[in-house]
Image: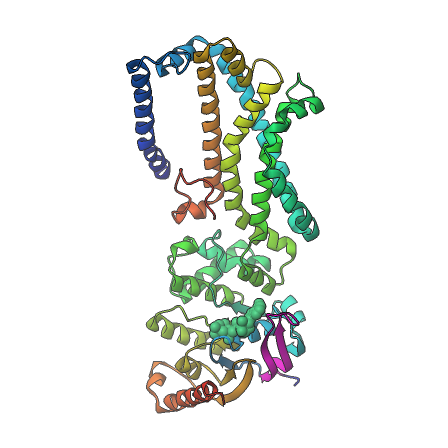
């Protein structure tokens, strides 16, 4: 598995092992993700998507098996700050203004004040909130907060982006805009993306591969290869896109049916 | 500035109600012929306040100094110990339940004992009472604010490979500020109460507590009431200072219209 951006080998995750509330969240996960690949994780609620993302980010440790990120243990990759994470909840700091939230990872990396200000301004433009740098997070709507947290994760151009339902709180139009922006950034920077979503069309639109998980315990049910090439708004009406979405939908139906 | 003006105009209704209450008090005492030693009229209290102003001002100043110095030391001790205990979990688990238990006991009851420990003539024992009363709420609340952080926020910092120290600075301390401010709202006026109760039992004889006991002892209740008025002015001033600190230290709460109320003390952040 050398050369893979992420190599997950024989991973189990059991929460609260040995106690009454033991949960087998993931079992026997094997997955290799190539550098620059865009992979989506999809599956019913509670099937372990967020858990898998946290294992890659070394925010959880596997009960069994190994996670390798850029050829090193996930723990080392975290210490090297190789990835940026967008959490399911925006998770902005109330006490920092919007721009200062975006600049937090830059601050921790010792960027100069001027560089930070320049970057956060660029990022605010990117997520279409150019006038909100001086606001506090609580003065923003939920969807706006989520866009700020995306800007924060992108601000230091990580080699790996881990995104947990980042567009879940957005309206359809903003969501479609953000999808195209994410694809643009992905193409321009060559970053590797692991993207958790509940949306079938979103997974088909964005990904090189869609990994379909089945619940209790979470396993990889199937992997749908998608290759839609360069995508724009017209792709959403392309029969090839519909075909892939249908493929993902059928895999999910099989999961629901207990297959 | 506009915000300050808004705050002051927010005080308007309170002033009207307060003035109305005083007028009612005056009217009831006069109308029902209540005798002065039971409940003096506001106007006669005001008269005594003017007549005894040098004594009362001195007493208020000295008692205020005890309250403020005890307040500062108690706050400092509470915050420092909270920081230390959150850094060392075992200490936290041992100390915090103990502090909660001690906090539930009436600490002012210790005043006579503190006199034995720290001397009955100096101000040290009075100060010790104030420190003890202030310390526990500050310690308990601040420690809670430092530990009860959102797991997502700590996870985000871990994703940046942040040290515990960075997490303390960036997450725990800002998170603890509203908890600390709640404690401050409680202990600021409490420090004046503690100082006065302590003075009932000992310490120098020119303080608010002694002015109240000695005048009440000579049935000069109007002077005692004047001293009480001075004490409440000192308490109010400290409460206002606590609100001011709250506002300047947490601009994000003011901006999002969260900390705007003067009258909801001890609200959970
Ligand atoms: N910290 C934890 N402690 C105990 N159990 C946990 C913990 N985190 C997750 N779980 C359990 O692991 C399972 C998978 O949870 P996870 O959050 O990964 O699901 P998910 O696929 O992201 O769901 P959703 O789509 O609703 O976000 C669930 O059964 C959950 O109860
Ligand atoms: Mg999840």
Check if residue A25 falls in the magenta segment.
yes
Q: Nearer the viewer, residue A135 or B193?
A: B193
Residue B214 seen from this side: yes
Position of residue A42 measured from the top left corner of the image (x, y, whole percent): 48, 80
Check if residue A10 falls in the magenta segment.
yes
Q: Which residues are magenta?
A: A4-33
Q: Nearer the viewer, residue B59 or B153?
A: B59
Position of residue A141 measured from the top left corner of the image (x, y, whole percent): 37, 60
Position of residue B31 measured from the top left corner of the image (x, y, whole percent): 28, 15
Question: Does residue B29 sit above or below A227 in this rendering?
Answer: above
Question: Does residue B112 sit above or below B51 in this rendering?
Answer: below
Position of residue A61 measured from the top left corner of the image (x, y, whole percent): 65, 71
Question: Does residue A115 sit above or below B185 in this rendering?
Answer: below
The residue positioned 44% from the left and 60% from the top of the image is A121
Residue A189 seen from this side: no
The residue positioned 41% from the left and 82% from the top of the image is A200
């Amino acid at each position: 598995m050398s050369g893979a951006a992420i190599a997950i080998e024989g991973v189990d995750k059991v929460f609260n092992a040995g106690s009454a509330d033991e949960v087998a969240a993931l079992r026997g996960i094997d997955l290799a993700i190539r550098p620059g690949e865009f992979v989506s994780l999809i599956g019913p609620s509670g099937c372990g998507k967020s858990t898998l993302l946290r294992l890659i980010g070394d925010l959880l440790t596997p009960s069994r098996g190994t996670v390798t990120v850029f050829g090193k243990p996930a723990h080392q990759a975290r210490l090297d700050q190789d990835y940026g994470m967008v959490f399911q909840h925006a998770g902005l700091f109330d006490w920092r203004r919007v721009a200062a939230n975006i600049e937090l990872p830059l601050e921790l990396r010792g960027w100069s004040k001027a560089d930070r200000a320049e970057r956060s301004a660029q990022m605010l433009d990117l997520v279409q909130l150019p006038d909100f740098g001086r606001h506090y997070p609580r003065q923003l709507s939920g969807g706006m907060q989520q866009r700020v947290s995306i800007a924060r994760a992108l601000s230091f151009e990580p080699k790996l982006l881990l995104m947990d339902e980042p567009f879940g709180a957005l309206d359809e139009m903003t969501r479609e805009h953000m999808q195209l922006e994410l694809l643009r950034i992905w193409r321009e920077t060559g970053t590797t993306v692991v993207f958790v979503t509940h949306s079938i069309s979103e997974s088909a639109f964005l990904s090189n591969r869609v990994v379909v998980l089945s619940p209790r315990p979470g396993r990889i049910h199937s992997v749908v290869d998608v290759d839609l090439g360069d995508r724009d708004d017209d792709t959403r009406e392309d029969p090839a896109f519909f075909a892939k979405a249908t493929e993902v939908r059928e895999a999910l139906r099989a999961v629901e049916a207990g297959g | 500035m506009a915000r300050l003006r808004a705050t002051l105009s927010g005080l308007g209704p309170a002033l009207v109600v307060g003035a109305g209450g005083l007028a009612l008090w005056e009217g009831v005492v006069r109308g029902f012929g209540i005798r002065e030693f039971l409940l003096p009229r506001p106007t006669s209290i005001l008269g005594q306040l003017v007549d005894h102003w040098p004594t009362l001002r001195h007493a208020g100043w000295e008692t205020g100094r005890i309250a403020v110095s005890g307040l500062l030391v108690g706050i400092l001790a509470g915050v420092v110990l909270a920081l230390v205990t959150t850094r060392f979990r075992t200490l936290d688990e041992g100390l915090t339940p103990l502090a909660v238990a001690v906090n539930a006991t009436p600490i002012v009851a210790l005043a006579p004992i503190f006199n034995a420990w720290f001397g009955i003539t100096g101000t040290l024992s009075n100060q010790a009472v104030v420190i003890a009363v202030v310390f526990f709420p500050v310690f308990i609340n601040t420690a809670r604010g430092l530990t009860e952080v959102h797991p997502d926020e700590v996870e985000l910092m871990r994703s940046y490979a942040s040290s515990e120290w960075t997490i303390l600075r960036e997450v725990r301390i800002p998170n603890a500020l509203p908890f600390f401010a709640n404690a401050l709202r409680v202990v600021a006026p409490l420090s004046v109460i503690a100082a006065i109760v302590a003075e009932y039992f000992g310490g120098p004889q020119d303080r608010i507590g002694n002015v109240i006991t000695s005048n009440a002892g000579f049935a000069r209740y109007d002077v005692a009431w004047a001293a009480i008025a001075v004490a409440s002015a000192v308490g109010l001033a400290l409460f206002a200072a606590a609100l001011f600190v709250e506002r300047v230290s947490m601009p994000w709460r003011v901006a999002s219209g969260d900390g705007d109320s003067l009258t909801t003390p001890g609200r959970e952040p």
